[in-house]
């Protein structure tokens, strides 16, 4: 089995465990984010609710003692890709929408928003509207001039 395939299976089981904790039903949980943390040393992938209570965890073998300087960027891209592949699972949790999956470092600091689900809208990106900051800056500049 290829390393990537094994990692994909480990992450898929992890996401399905999260989904099992929040089954889709008429009574939805009031939660805004699922916080994911990855340890570059231990390979732990952990999920927490808004209160910091652990939902589930797994160890991704490929990530144990990973020394790659771009580790967070690679993990972000990998998790986004898996969430797209498992859209039916991550988009149908028993959580009141909108909710999002957020990647954090080991101290709980936000690294990236991985996935945002809001009824028919799903946003899978760091940036909702690329170039918006520049357009707002130009708009404000013209207002001031």
Image (tube, helix red, strand yellow):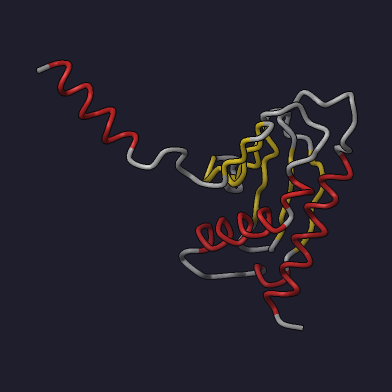
Whether 17 is drawn above or below 32: the answer is below
The image quadrant of residue 144 is top left
Q: Is residue 19 left or right of residue 7?
A: right
Q: Is residue 132 left or right of residue 138?
A: right
Q: Residue at x 57, y 46 (%)?
A: 124
Which quarter of the figure is the N terminus placed in? Answer: bottom right
Which quarter of the figure is the C terminus placed in? Answer: top left
Q: Residue at x 32, y 34 (%)?
A: 133
Q: Is residue 64 left or right of residue 16?
A: left
Which residue is at the front of the view, 5 or 57?
5
| Position of residue 113 measured from the top left corner of the image (x, y, whole percent) | 56, 42
Q: Residue furthest front?
A: 120
Which residue is at the front of the view, 25 or 32?
25
| Position of residue 111 measured from the top left corner of the image (x, y, whole percent) | 52, 46
Q: Residue at x 67, y 40 (%)?
A: 35
| Position of residue 24 measured from the top left corner of the image (x, y, whole percent) | 87, 36
Q: Residue furthest top?
A: 144
Q: Residue at x 78, y 35 (%)?
A: 53
Which residue is at the front of the view, 87 or 109?
87
| Position of residue 23 measured from the top left corner of the image (x, y, whole percent) | 89, 38
């Amino acid at each position: 089995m290829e390393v990537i395939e094994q990692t994909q299976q480990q992450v898929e089981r992890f996401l399905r465990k999260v989904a099992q904790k929040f089954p889709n039903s008429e009574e939805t949980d009031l939660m805004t984010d699922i916080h994911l943390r990855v340890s570059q040393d231990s390979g732990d992938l952990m999920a927490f609710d808004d209160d910091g209570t652990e939902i589930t965890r797994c160890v991704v073998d490929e990530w144990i003692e990973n020394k790659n300087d771009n580790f967070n960027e690679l993990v972000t891209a990998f998790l986004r890709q898996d969430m797209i592949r498992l859209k039916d699972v991550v988009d149908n949790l028993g959580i009141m929408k909108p909710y999002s999956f957020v990647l954090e470092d080991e101290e709980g600091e936000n690294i990236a928003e991985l996935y945002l689900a809001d009824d028919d809208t799903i946003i899978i990106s760091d940036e909702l509207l690329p170039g918006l900051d520049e357009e707002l800056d130009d708009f404000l500049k013209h207002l001031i001039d």
